[in-house]
Amino acid sequence: MRFKELDLNLLVVFATLMETRSVTRTGERLSLTQPAASAALRRLRTYFGDPMLVQVGKRMHPTPFAEALYPQIQRALTQVTHAIATPAGFDPATSSRRFRINASDYVMVAVLVELAARLRARAPGIQLEVQLPSETNAEDLENGRIDLLIAPEQLLAPWHPSDFLYEEEQAVVGWRGNPAMDGGLTEDLFFAAGHVGVALGAQRAATFADTQLARMGRQRRIEIEVASFASVPWFVQRTDRLAVLHKRLVRAMMPQFDLAFVPMPFPFPRLREMVQFHESRRDDGGLIWLREELRMAALATA
């Protein structure tokens, strides 16, 4: 199909070239021969009057014009993808749709396990693909690589809509044999104790708990730092170390570990967990249904 004398298929080639920076890999991804992919690049250069991508060594580098054009083309292709992927009607009982959810391992254990159980009974054909958060969360949502982002309120992209999912209380976790778990944990003992901390992603981002403590001008004595919430119990059990974890997660872990938990020994804010979706998917019947199922799963695990 042509629009203003441009073959719209070339926009898909352009977006793929920008992702791969390789004519060969673009051809492989789009099932084109290398000569056909090279010819598509030549047509793009002719239409826009710009080299678009330039070979430097073994890699192609986009021109400033291509860099500026790419986000606009990417958004347009994403909206088209969303439009054609959304069926006229959505019946969870018969649908085999695959939903991609970005959520922390804490949310996976605390809420998504319950969601999976609900879907197995109500929508057996539905598939879930769960991805861990990264520095590209907002970009992945923007480009349609995920359907839903579950994250604390302060981490959402402000230009897309979101729904409140649930509030979460933080708790102090320790081995059941730790004397601090007998009800005598004070603020002084909390900060004097060694802790297991969590730092997320390649950038080692602070958790909600540590971010709030930093705002209070306080810092825990971290003896061990791990990359996931689910790893914490292994380093707490049979030690005198403490950890701060989400209450839902602690309850889910207790049958598998010899743990106990007590409230924070000083006033502490609650985490507001949200679910975000792309503006263009606001009326997507499947996502409306899935968000409601998520809400019910969160209520069940409260």
Image (cartoon, rainbow, N blue to C red):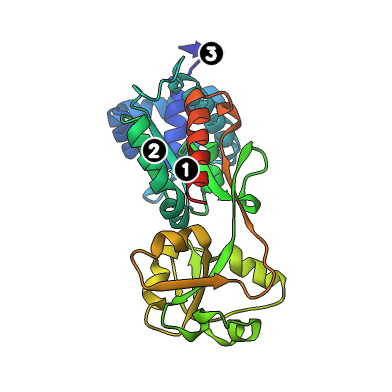
Dot 3: element:
strand
| Sequence-earlier tag: 1 or 3 | 3
The Cα atoms of the two marked residues, 1 and 2, are separated by 8 Å
Image marks 1 and 2: residues in contact by CB distance under 8 Å: yes
Picture layout, residue 189 above or below residue 149? below
Residue at image point 48% right, 36% down: 293
Of the two numbered discs 1 and 3 in the rendering, the one whose residue sits closer to the viewer = 1
Q: Which residue is mark 1?
A: 297
Q: Amino acid at mark 3?
A: Phe
Identify the residue at image location x=65%, y=81%. Answer: 187
- Give the structural element (helix, strand or loop) at label 1: helix
Decide: is 158 above or below 239. above
Q: Amino acid at mark 1?
A: Ala
Disc on the earlier residue, 1 or 2: 2
**Total marks placed:** 3
Marks 1 and 3, how far apart in space?
46 Å
Q: At x 56% / y 50%, what residue is drawn? A: 151
Q: Of marks 3 and 2, which one's residue comes earlier in the chain?
A: 3
Quarter assignment of residue 162 = top right
Instruction: Determine the residue located farthest toward the front in the rendered image.
Output: 182
**Residue 19 horizontal/vertical position (percent):** 44, 41
Mark 2, residue position: 118
Mark 3 highlights which residue?
3
Q: Are marks 1 and 3 in contact (CB under 8 Å)?
A: no
Q: Is residue 234 left or right of residue 49?
A: left
